[in-house]
Amino acid sequence: MRKLIGIAVCVLCGCAPPPRPAELNSASGMFSDQVAAQSAQRAAPAVFTLAQRYYKLAQEDYNARRMESCVSHSLLAAVKFSTALEHSRRLQAEERRAKAEEKLAAAKKKLAQQEQRRREAEDRVMRLEQIQALRAKLAEEQEKSKAEKARIAAELEKARAEAEARLAAEQKAAAERLAAEQKALEEARRDKATQEALAAAASKLQTAESLEAATFDPNNFGIAKNFLEQARAAAQQKRFEDAQTLAQNASQKADAAIAASQEQYARKQEKMKLLSERKALFEEAYRLPTLVRQEGRGVVVSLYDLFAPGKNIILPERYSLLDQVAEIAQRYSAYPLVVEGYTDSVGSDAANLALSQGRAQAVLDYLVQIRKLDFNRVKASGYGSSNPVADNSTAEGRSKNRRVEVIFLFR
């Protein structure tokens, strides 16, 4: 009968794999994004390697059904992955800024070259003017005709006008290129600031999500997500001021969601930890070679045949069972213990009450004096023939009623 009960409990409690935690699914989603993973690995290989290690530990914890450790390692993997990805984004923004600065330097260099050509053109014009003067003087000296003087002057004027027109066109083109490069550099700077604000907001939103803010503070969490989506759309449209403002709003709402969710998330984690610990306690106690059950007040271990008939001295051959109970009690030291003695209905109520109290006290003394459990942790009571678990009219029933129960009280 005890084996059948064990099989049923195994089927109901331990054999089916537990559902994957949301934190593990979230971390898996991150690592499945190959583009993001490659960028994060190139930018911060050490941090990315640490994220992979936590993710692997989370998977091992899940396979081993260490759910609390699985959740913790999943969160650490997600945070390290986000940190590496953020570093990648910052490096990309720095690269864009450096390229823009290189282009600006090239434009300045080209403008300097244009200025040099302008000066050279002015020199050429000056030489032309000198030539004109010399030719005019020569014409006067040689008494050339006025027609020849007019022709030379016209040619020199045309050459000067053409040179000045070319110089003006080159200066205008250089100024336009310089203005375009400066505009590109300013746009790169604003884009970098916007991407930093988006990354900060996304990081805070991810933190809020890991704290289950969608459940504990859905209003602020939903508003933060909406602001972040609007900020990203504005960034794509190059509305950088709007994008930064929306990203700051998303960060503020995410901070509010984090503040509202932290305490509730901690309470939930503590409750899950306590339930997991109770389950582990019951499963460990259930492996004892005796009857074990779980009630609202705690885990009840029923001990039989500890004493000779009518005696309250523990039989030496039953010490090993009490030792196993004590070992479990030492491993779960936070649980108070109650020892309850019961008898069958044979004999007077007073005698049965005294016998049950003596047997409960004997078990308490063994646990405290021999196994060194804390005396303040263990209480003993005798209840005589009350609370029977079987029919006292049969020998088998009376045997089941003669018992000592050690109860691990739930915290």
Image (cartoon, rainbow, N blue to C red):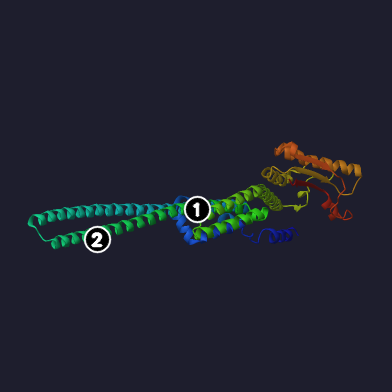
Residue 304 shown left or right of residue 149 in the figure? right
Residue 176, image x, y percentages: 36, 57
SS class, disc 2: helix
Would you identify the image quadrant in which residue 174 lies? Answer: bottom left
Q: Nearer the viewer, residue 194 or 107?
A: 107
Q: Which mark is residue 194?
A: 1
Going 21% across and 60% down the picture, which residue do you hit?
159
Going 11% across and 61% down the picture, which residue do you hit?
145
Q: Amino acid at mark 1?
A: Thr
355 relative to 158, above or below: above
- The residue under label 2 is 162
Image quadrant in which the C terminus is located? top right
Going 22% across and 58% down the picture, which residue do you hit?
160
Q: Amino acid at mark 2?
A: Glu
Residue 305, image x, y percentages: 78, 48
Q: Which mark is residue 209?
A: none
Going 10% across and 59% down the picture, which residue do you hit?
144
176 relative to 329, above or below: below
For the question of whether residue 260 can be seen, the reply is yes
